[in-house]
């Protein structure tokens, strides 16, 4: 039976390095691929790593850190770019997804501007964060429930907004479907959307946007 | 075969007068029921009346007016109450639904505060309308697409918000489903929701709210 | 990383005090926020608090009670208003949602009229509860399965009806979707709807309705 | 290419005669099959026949009548059975479906008890029709929108209830889906359901129920 | 807080005795209601009783038996009627639902004809069971996956068919939705449908059908 | 702006010739591409051609025929293969889809065995067609409504069954979704499924199956 | 009643000029707003303009052109930026959406690289377009049916991909839902998605991406 | 109560031997049926057998092997056919489904060509596997997430493609629905689809295809 085969040329071809999706892998599989990637490029990143595995791997892998809220395991880092990228959400429930995006971007070398207290039902905070987010080249906006925050932010800033619906909610949120549909129907121009809870995917889009600029 | 039977006691029992749903009736049926209701109570109201029928009926029915955008036909009016009720939406596309609510409330005797230019992608207008909407006992908020406006308004005012999703949109709006789900998942407390495009239903809820106060 | 930030002005701005949504918080987080809220306003309320946490917190927080069926933790109370608000449902399965609404309203200072034995398949009980529910300024009607009870009640009383679908049922109830759709399509005027299982949300709507009357 | 082939033995095998579904057939096809069926059994029935075709065919086919509301074309009739079967609905919008059931049952030889003014928002009428419907061996209950009527009727009578959802409604009725789901989740025992708008199907179920009794 | 209240007149009013839905009740609640019902009418039935509770209660309740596959607990029985009612399904997976129907009918006093080996992919067995099922006054057909069996059986017998979709399947069965939709769209006249996995509901419909015949 | 570009090598690469999907093209576009394909390979086929266009084009294109029920336009034909392929459906409503498959297969050179009178509610016909369909290398089974026919046929024959759901039906058929889901959940092994109404697609699968045999 | 109010500051605030959504407006409304916008900024753009209206308006508005496939009406243009943006799709059916994106980008001043012949079932063309698309700062990929093209392109180029599902298809495409879901689940990093058929929205995202670079 | 009854003639009638679906059976039931089948035909196969049961049964059943990734238990084998059948997928997550297909086909006697490293975001591998897959009589393509791989493969090879969507993914994959819809809408001719995760079903289709060739 075949095993996991690493696509080393992907970084050159697509501007995004190969990253380990930890959700469907054992601790041993994550360790082996991380070592292989780090040996090749001095950098390895794994997402959706459970806390128990993440803490254990961070203790044995080279140059490694584990971020529990984000569930991200990082070995080494890509060179710093000084590009500012914003990550905004309304609060505690959406933090794991927002942090997955933020930690991925930081590992990719970018400066992350985090605003985790902006909700649509308290506009003063959205307005207060306007200048800071407007100074970023891209803004990732994470929201569950009614998914309205990307529309509000996109009406305030000049940067493109990448919207990430989360599965936060219950009942008629249908696992994030309500937020997803809301974001796809945003009346504010300049909003594009990634899959539910896909903080990593949003970070990749933002990374490709700022990397294709040079 | 049975015919339409008017429930004259409904007004006393439920605080809402019997109103004609014009969508599934012929011009002759609307005329006959309107005459019967007006003869009994000096008041008749019909919603979803097509323009051709509405103009023709307004010309022959007693004390009648027809509102084309709202598709509402009115004969007489209930006594003025001086109660202020707000109706807000973002603009042209949602006007028929907002106007259906506004004209129904006006016919029921209330003072309607209309703000038809508040959208989530331009918060300055929502903020500018705050004091006016906050002075109303109830605010009806009509929105299609991502349906985010009720959350924004409910975060700004003390009055309860009745949210009306509209079928305005295309693609992943799925005929108003996106707006409906967003409103049901509102993170702002104090929002309740009626059926898609149901401006009349929102007006009835608002009317019952202010009528049960005496 | 940012932490939970309390929006102390929300009460003044929206007539609803900040309330703790316990479902996504640890016992420690609930305790900390409850102490902070109680210190500021002499009142704190938390919903969706698991029994184990609720009993423990009720023992250590000031002026605290825990209601197991409702999963509500309360410290202090808002001033009594003497306003009557009805809460109706058909029986045991819907009790947690109905009680969440009832205990929230009681904590907000209102007199709650509870009728937990009215089902559509036994109309005599609905009719027997008519006068009592008709004397309330608002009636919250909680129902799972076919979600027909709000239509029946709204045809009997003058007060506005806030309908709460519950996820009670199986198979084609699809987690409360059947009840939700039924309520949105109510043929009885004056019914508005909140999210599935959202007893707290219905209480907030009712509270805003009776609070905007003064 | 093959053509329509009549299954003459179906009546003996299943207790239901072959009936023409007119919706997908030309006037000529309906005429030809009706003549063939009538020649064989002295009886032919076609449903979903458009008014223009129905009136024309009623004028030329033997022993024929056309019912416009029901869209049913009938040639001859089956022997009278004196069995009482109830058909109930709330009013005008559901009439075509209720009448399709009623006219089919009448053609099959049964006595149809029609109550077309019973709605859930006016319980006095449901209660007033109780004895009459309770005297029927089966009751067909037709309803659109929230589809609550079958639950109410099934709680009042001893006969089995066949529920027919209709596509009457808009927005979140989703073409009758809301009513269908409500009926499938009925809390009243003894309710079974047929397809949306399928008045003919409900009549067949009722006919099989009373025919399997001898 | 209110408690469970038994509706003792339901049997007279609707021809179906009050039955305990065990899924949402504790062992103590089931015991208490069963004792109360048995004391009043010499009969009590509970469905969806978990094996551990069922075995324990059968040991202490009067005249009691527990059926593990059906998850049905029975105390006493209604008088035998000698009416034959068929229950058919394709095999092991659908047995719990078929048995729930069969044991309920047996407790209600009817003679149950069980055929649990008829599947659409092996027509010889369906054909072999034809005469036996055709001798029943009603046939309950239980099926998961593509839900085709009711159509096949209804084309073979004169009795009405009550179709019960089950949640058996995976992937695109969507918890029984595929079977439910198939049954609602049956091309065979005389099929009506109850909720997914609702064997008890089908038994009630069959019971009402044969009880309304006297 | 670019125009339609024909992929001449597709036939060699995939064993299926390029075929014109007429639904989204003007008569002039169909004519131009058909002439180009016929000039290159002596064969052109267009599906979903409206009757008016089909008759007109058949009159002017070389070696052309138009099949109205199938909506297929054919110029020339591929060499005869003598391979027998079955096409089965229940009757008139499904004929356009069945004929689209049959005419495509005939144009591709295969011998088509058509059985258009086999329905699940009349098993004698399915049984009567067994030997004929069993002699085919592949059987395409077309069905709307409950979509049960492929399961029945696949339980009778040794050849693989390609199931084609059709949009025939109403209400809970949801445009063919019910039939599609039923077919995907077939309990009979050896059934695979194509898109709703995709008779052409089924023909391509059958053609590839028998062409990959040499 | 309020009328259309132009938000002149939107361009400065969000980097996207106010654009007229022609679908819900009369020819007169489009003309009036276009004149107002052109008078203010020397530029006006309207999308979803029907051919009849577009040709007529292009004849009377200043500096105007109408693009029939794209349904875009343009008066004047923004300054040229020399930034290359790619637009790719598989062919004729998706052209209106691809062209809406392309004409909008051209009007916004960018150089559009159009590749309208790349489909997933003919990879040689996708590979042939690789270098050209890789030279663009952003690539918009438009696809209906299975919506697989964005994944394929995103695996080939370094630029970010904005995916636009189209409603092209039938049956189980469910109006573009199949393509939308596929794109949201893309296994290729760097893909974000806009609403079904929203070519204009994709152009706005691309425009914001390249405009936030300076 | 009836028990499991083996349909020994199914193999002759449908070309597919009776196979044990282990998911809903106890270890004892699997053992008993496997022994009965092996005694009759020298061959038994069980799918969806949990690892603990599979290892235990492989140790005691005659001529038995258990494949953990595939969850397949095999006793004996059918005669080798030397027919090549391809199984392709993108990697680790889809392996259980791909292996279920591969091990079933191997047990049925065919030569399985496995390519488990072909994904749409890395076309070089798909192109590299072209000749090998093109040499197979049928190719089974397994894919989760956006489900695009079958379209890509079907555009490269002459053999028919059987597409198997998997439930691999999260958020808007909706348990494999996204992949399923994508495959049903494939723009590449010659693709047919089986249920989500149904590797066994795909193997049966492939087996029937190559078995009906002789």
Image (cartoon, coloured by chain):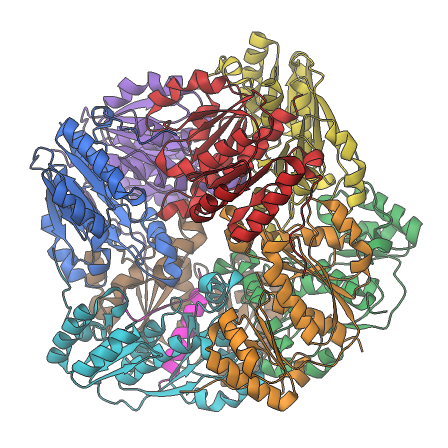
Chain colours: A red, B purple, C blue, D brown, E cyan, F green, G yellow, H orange
Total numbered labels placed on residues in the image? 0
Q: Which of A144 and G6 lies nearest the eye of the viewer? A: A144
Nearest the eye: E207 or A149 = A149
In the image, residue B165 above or below residue E167: above
Residues shaded magenta: D188-214
Left or right of B105? Residue B9 is: left
Along the horizontal axis of the image, is B104 left or right of E193? left
Give the percent coordinates (x, y) of residue B11. Answer: 19, 42
Residue at 31%, 52% (x, y): give it.
Answer: B4
Give the quarter of the figure containing the C terminus of chain F.
bottom right
Q: Is residue H184 visible?
A: yes
Q: Can you say whether B180 is above or below D98 in the image?
A: above
- The quarter of the picture where residue D181 lies is bottom left
Q: Is residue G47 left or right of residue H207?
A: left
Question: Going 17% across and 75% down the picture, which residue do you hit?
Answer: E34
| Front one among A84 and A158 | A84
**Of the pair C87 and A1, the residue shown nearer to us:** A1
Is residue C57 a member of the stretch shown in magenta?
A: no
Q: Check the image and report above or below for A197 versus E147.
A: above
Residue G86 at x, y = what percent? 71, 29
Identify the image quadrant of the N terminus of chain F: top right
Judge whether residue D194 is colored magenta: yes
Quarter of image, res G82: top right
Q: Position of residue A16 (x, y in %)?
A: 63, 35
Residue F169, percent across and down? 54, 61
């Amino acid at each position: 039976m075949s095993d996991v085969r690493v696509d080393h040329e992907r970084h050159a071809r697509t501007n995004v390095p190969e990253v380990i999706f930890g959700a469907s892998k054992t601790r041993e599989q994550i360790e082996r691929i991380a070592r292989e990637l780090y040996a090749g490029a001095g950098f390895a990143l794994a997402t959706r790593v459970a806390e128990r595995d993440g803490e254990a791997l961070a203790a044995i892998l080279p140059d490694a850190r584990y971020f529990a809220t984000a569930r991200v395991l990082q070995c080494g880092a890509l060179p710093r770019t000084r590009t500012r990228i914003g990550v905004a959400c309304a609060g505690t429930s959406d933090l794991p997804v927002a942090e997955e995006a933020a930690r991925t971007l930081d590992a990719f070398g970018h400066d992350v501007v985090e605003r985790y207290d902006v909700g649509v039902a308290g506009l003063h905070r959205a307005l207060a964060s306007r200048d800071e987010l407007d100074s970023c080249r891209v803004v990732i906006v994470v929201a569950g429930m009614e998914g309205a925050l990307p529309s509000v932010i996109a009406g305030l800033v000049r940067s493109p907004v990448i919207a990430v619906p989360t599965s936060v909610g219950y009942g008629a949120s249908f696992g994030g479907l309500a937020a997803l549909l809301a974001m796809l129907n945003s009346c504010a121009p300049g909003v594009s959307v990634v899959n539910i809870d896909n903080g990593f995917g949003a970070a990749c889009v933002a990374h490709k946007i700022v990397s294709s600029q040079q």
